[in-house]
Image (cartoon, grey):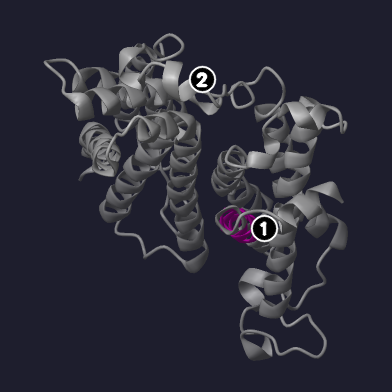
Amino acid sequence: MLALRLTRGAHPSLLLRRLLVAVASAGTGFLLLCVLGHAVAHPDRAPASLLRLAWCALPLAAAVHLAVAVARTDPGARPRPGLFSAGLGPFRLAAVAAASTAAACALGSALALLSYLLLRGGLPGLPGLPPNGAAAGPSAGTRPLPVPAALTLLALVPAAASTAVALALRPGGRASGRRRPPAATGTAGATAPLPAAREPSGPAPAGLPWGVALVAAGLALEVYGTRGAGGGVPLPGGVPGGPAPVLAGWALTALGLVVAGPGLAHLCGRLLQAYRPGTVRLLAGRALMDESRRIGRPLGVLCAVVSAGVAVSALYARTDARPPGPLSGLGAALVLVCAVAALSAAAVESRQHRAGTTAVLRRLGAPTGLLRSAALLRAAVLVAGFAPLAWLTAALTALPLRP
């Protein structure tokens, strides 16, 4: 009940982000129900149904990633001194955030079930889409749907997302350890140093060399896998199959990009203020170094998604397979949209983290154009640092797949 009241009183932008979580949950739940429909309609093709279910792990992971990123932007999930007396300690706030996430995902699962039942014409009083059972193939409209299996699949996204949010916001976790800048106090405007005059908190991320090593290992494994004969693990959309080492190489490459993201963002901030930095470069560079862990990982995820999309497109072109079907397109769109939305949520979290410092700068007379220029410079440097990485990784990943 408390989670529902906080949801109703939330800021419209937070409600919009939670709506995106519900949409991601709805799309993932719809894909899971379509897999169930395929299994019911083709009981003699159990391996194909299991493979489709395994590929649904990608949109499921993307939806959970988005849910965690959105939960970190919720101001109500942050510990505050006045809430302890009301019984809302760190554990209770994490539980409330997990309940809010579960509610949003449950709404999406309900929408997925409604859409699926409309597709197979199973709702009395409402016309099916399309009529006359034209969608009986993917939705198993001519066969009864096992209710326990459908409810189990629909509960996957709310359960996984709420568990991930509770773990991410638990006391002592990375998200719950966000500190309030000294500028948030009433007298900090006169005594707190400028952010350009202090070092960013915490050591530099140590994942950059490990990420580079994982990317190199993934590319080497992919090159090794392309030497084998055809066949292997089928891909969604009708591609005959890709060798298992190639898919394992893609997974290692994607993991390497995610691991290297924070270190690369920190390096971009350090290079930005390397030689005679002015005020704008110094502010932008220190902010990037301080927020490298917060913004670098979603950037790495987005780079991994883009690189994998280019590689899969090259594989489709090599095999001359038919264009991806609507379910494959829905899964790919879900993964991409969730990656972009999670990056936007991370940017919002970073802005909230800088709110106290921004207030100090404004009280000290810093012009608005200075802060806007620093923000634009941070965005430009991140694009200049991560876009070539995504393009280079995609080109190297797709190179062995060319005929």
Quarter of the image with the C terminus in it: top left
Q: Residues within 10 Å of mark 2 (few under 14, many from 20)?
A: some
The magenta segment is 16-28
Residue at the disc numbered 1? 29
Question: Which residue type does callout 2 highlight?
Answer: Pro
| The residue positioned farthest toward the top in the image shown | 203
For badge 1, the amino acid type reads: Gly
Q: CA distance from mark 1 to mark 2?
A: 44 Å
Q: Mark 1 vs mark 2: which is more N-terminal?
A: 1
**On screen, residue 382 above or below 29:** above
Q: Is residue 27 above or below residue 195?
A: below
Give the label on residue 7, or none.
none
The kind of secondary structure element at disc 2 is: helix
- Dot 1: what SS? helix
Q: Is residue 18 left or right of residue 191?
A: right
Q: Is residue 95 magenta?
A: no
Residue of label 2: 182
Q: Is label 1 or label 2 in front?
A: 2
Name the residue nearer the viewer: 53 or 5: 5
Residue that extends furthest to the left in the rendered view of this protein: 276
Judge whether residue 19 is colored magenta: yes
- Residue at 36% across, 42% down: 308
Relative placement, left or right, of 65 versus 385 is: right
Mark 1 packing: few (<14 Cα in 10 Å), some, or many (20+)? many
**Between residues 317 and 108, which one lies in front from this camera angle?**
108
> In this rendering, is residue 371 above or below 106?
above
Location of residue 141 with respect to 19 vertically, above or below: below
Residue 241 pos. (x, y %): 43, 46
Q: Residue at x 63, y 42 (%)?
A: 74
Residue at left 72%, top 54%?
7
Residue 43 visible, this angle: no
Question: What main secondary structure does the magenta stretch of the protein show?
Answer: helix
